[in-house]
Image: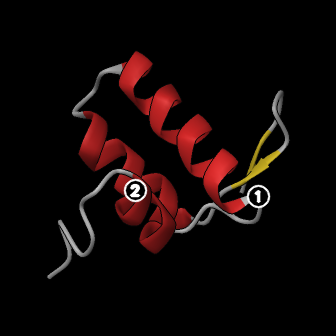
Amino acid sequence: MKISSSKLDVSESGLAAVVRLSNGDMRKALNILQSTHMASQQQITEEAVYLCTGNPGAGRA
């Protein structure tokens, strides 16, 4: 999935992780996306989101 205006490549599981961690807070979601993008410079995956936010493995069953 591409986040169009910023041309970010985000996996479905990565997007789900952003939604879980942001708890509906759009500013937090944008901060997570920006931070993860700056850290990885590649596709934003679930693993990258959790590692970037200091929550490795959080939310996984």
Q: Is residue 32 above or below residue 51?
A: above
Which amino acid type is marked by label 2?
Ala
Query: Residue 60: where, in percent of width, then height?
Result: 20, 76
* Total count of labels: 2
Q: Going by the image, does 23 lie left or right of 43?
A: left
Q: Is residue 41 left or right of residue 59?
A: right
Q: Identify the image quadrant of residue 16.
A: bottom left
**Which of the 4 image quarters holds residue 17?**
bottom left
- Direction from residue 13 to residue 19 in the image, left or right: left
Q: Amino acid at mark 1?
A: Gln
Q: Which residue is mark 2?
A: 16
Does 18 sit above or below residue 29?
Answer: below
Q: Which of the image's four quarters has the C terminus?
A: bottom left
Placement of 50 over or under 19, stated as above or below: below
* Disc 2 secondary structure class: helix
Position of residue 24 in the picture relative to residue 13 (left or right)? left
Secondary structure found at label 1: loop
Q: Residue 21 in the image: state x and y as whole percent.
A: 26, 44
Q: What kind of colouring is applied to the model shown? A: secondary structure
Gap between marks 1 and 2, in whole Å?
A: 19 Å
User: Residue 12 is drawn in which quadrant?
Assistant: bottom right
In the image as oriented, which residue stretches furthest toward the bottom?
A: 61
Q: Residue at x 71, y 57 (%)?
A: 1
Q: Mark 1: few, some, or many residues within 10 Å (few <14, many ≥20)?
A: few
Q: Residue at x 76, y 65 (%)?
A: 42
Which residue bears the numbered disc 1?
41
**Picture coordinates of residue 55, whole percent (x, y):** 24, 61
User: Which numbered disc, 1 or 2, marks the residue closer to the eye?
Assistant: 1
| Structural crowding at the residue carrying mark 2, measured as other residues with C-alpha within 10 Å and reported as few (<14), some (14–19) or many (≥20) | some
Of the image marks 1 and 2, the number of the one nearer the N terminus: 2
Which residue is at a point 56% across and 50% down the rendered structure image? 36
Q: Which mark is residue 24?
A: none
